[in-house]
Image (cartoon, helix red, strand yellow):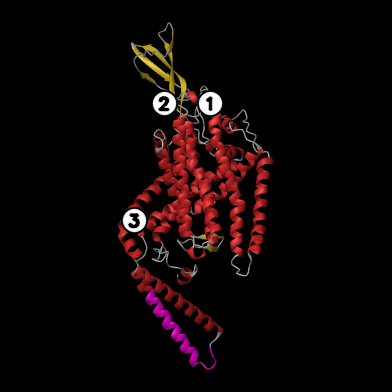
Amino acid sequence: MGFPAGLLSAAWICFVVAILLCFFVAVFFVRRYQKKAYSERPVTVIAVLSMFIVLLTMALVPVDVYIVSSMKDDSGNYKEWASSTEQREEITNAVLYGYYALYGLITLFAFILLPFAYFYYEEGGDEESTPREKACTGVKYTLGFVFVCAVLLLVGGLVPFSNGTSDTNSTDFEKKIVNLAQDLKSTGLENSLSFVISVLTMFGTLYAVLYTSYGLASVPIGMIRGFSSAKSESVQVRKRHTAASERSRAARARNQVRPSGSSYKERRQMRQIEEEEKLLGDRLQKLEGVVSSKWQCCLQAMKPFMTIFGILFLLFSTFLVVTLFINSLDRILHSVGYKLGFALEKPRITNPVDQAFIVFSEVFPFDYIVFALIVLYLVVCTIGGMRRVDIWCCWIKMYKVRPGRTEPQGVLMVAFLMMFCVLYLNTMVMSLAPQYVMFGSQKYNYTCTMTNTTQNGTNATAFAAPGYAYDQVALPVLDDGNSTGNGSSDGNATMHYYCSGTCDFSLSEDVDEGACMQTRITLLLNRFIYKIWFFGDVYYGGNWLVVLMFFVGLLHACIKQRRSALDDYRDVDSDSSDDDILA
């Protein structure tokens, strides 16, 4: 018996809507930031597709959760269409193949298409270059990326990492993680692809610490503080332009009265003054155009609303970061250690996001909507962080990210970095909502016992369930048709009941194997984290760095100077180095 048509339709409808939303988001951001005067169709297509594909990996997570959650009823029993292991694997394998297809496309874009397009248009800076010469240059540099990809694939497929066996000193939880990691049988090709994606995610952790964490703080603060007034900024620039003009006239007058002419140092200072005068004049002209524009009037009208939304977004960012801190603290206090990626048996500290998602998942697609909004917010903050930090290579600023003014190579670099960052966000959501991402709202059945002991005329009842501590409490004798009891001459009686609990990693060995089914995204990530614990530790350390950099970014965003009125004005075209010269 296959997946019910009604449930399948609900999952597919939501996923199709998510596909359209991901495509819209990718097109919107690429078209918004690329420079219109130098817009190249191949650049647009490759950048849009790369962002679209990596966003789909996030959109597939709620569908994955929905499928495993819908396999069980409220009492924890598997439904008829998912009663056998073969039926469940047949359904979940469709999701698994979807992840593999998307990760394969990400590898294609990261190592072939994006590098080729970048170096093709980097060579295009030379107007004398022919398309053939540009293509040769692109292929030459792309071969280096292909070589790196081939090495990673060979390492992932051939090198024998941890074999997935546990020693006799391992705890029950450690053995359980090993068994769950072995639950997904993998081939050499799957191991190779997992290794490549794990390496890309590791680099994504570094970029997310730089861009996502700073964006979570700077985007709301920027909305609260707003831009500087175009009118007051134009007054300041006019004063600076007048002063620069006076210095320029004075320098020219000195050079005219000197019979020996000016020295090399004086000529260099003269060129700097003239360049500053020219740039200030251009900036003043642009500011005067902004002051009289309708866009400026709209910004002034929207300022109160931007402030309100900025405060709400700041509270939401803080809420996400605090949740990430709670999970990280819980893992460092109660996890099994670094060799298993700080895996947590069961949350000991309440995780508000996780608990909310478990409740939301019972009303599909409400959890899908909330999940999509959180992912969209994280993507917006990541791009906002790129916009404020810009793209650097070591200490060299490569590109400025500005609406309508980003160079084609800069657009490709933004798409390239976004692929890395979103891959890390896949692991980050497992920290924000671990139970939801792993098991959804699944429940499981177990046998619980109740022992009635007659003590001084009072029935003292002890309740025991596998894997849980219990206390003796005074309760009346229960009579349940589904229970079985054992009596004794001293007045003791033991009854067995069928109870249900929420799925997590703390299940005892008394619970039947397969009582809870993990999502495919969890198995994909955890399998390689177990095989190479270094990856799990990097992702976990990245969570701490995101928390730390959020508060550092919050302080920096509060004390830095407000952004110029020209910063978000799309019709203003300026050289990327103007702000640095005039700063």
Binning the other alpha carbons within 10 Å of mark 3 as few (below 14), some (14 to 19) or many (20 upward) gives: some
| Element type where label 3 sits in the image | helix
Amino acid type for the residue under numbered disc 2 = Asp
**First of labels 2, 3 by sequence position:** 2
Q: Nearer the viewer, residue 374 or 97?
A: 97
Proximity of marks 2 and 3: CB atoms separated by less than 8 Å: no
Q: CA distance from mark 2 to mark 3?
A: 43 Å
| Element type where label 1 sits in the image | loop
> Residue 227 sits in which quadrant?
bottom left
> Residue extending furthest bottom?
259
The image shows residue 292, relative to residue 474, as above or below, that is below
| Residue drawn at (44%, 48%) of the image | 376
The x, y position of residue 452, in whole percent, is 39, 13
Amino acid type for the residue under numbered disc 3 = Met
Amino acid type for the residue under numbered disc 1 = Gly
Would you name the residue on which mark 1 appears? Answer: 514
The x, y position of residue 193, in whole percent, is 62, 43
Q: CA distance from mark 1 to mark 2?
A: 17 Å
Would you name the residue on which mark 2 appears? Answer: 74
Binning the other alpha carbons within 10 Å of mark 1 as few (below 14), some (14 to 19) or many (20 upward) gives: few
Would you name the residue on which mark 3 appears? Answer: 306
The x, y position of residue 442, in whole percent, is 45, 29
Left or right: residue 560 versus residue 271 is left
> Residue 219 sits in which quadrant?
bottom left
The image shows residue 181, relative to residue 52, as above or below, that is above
> Residue 398 sits in which quadrant?
bottom right
| Element type where label 2 sits in the image | loop
Location of the C terminus (image quadrant): bottom left
Residue bounds of the magenta highlight:
237-261
Q: Nearer the viewer, residue 394 or 102?
A: 102
The image shows residue 228, relative to residue 322, as above or below, that is below
Q: Nearer the viewer, residue 363 or 8?
A: 8
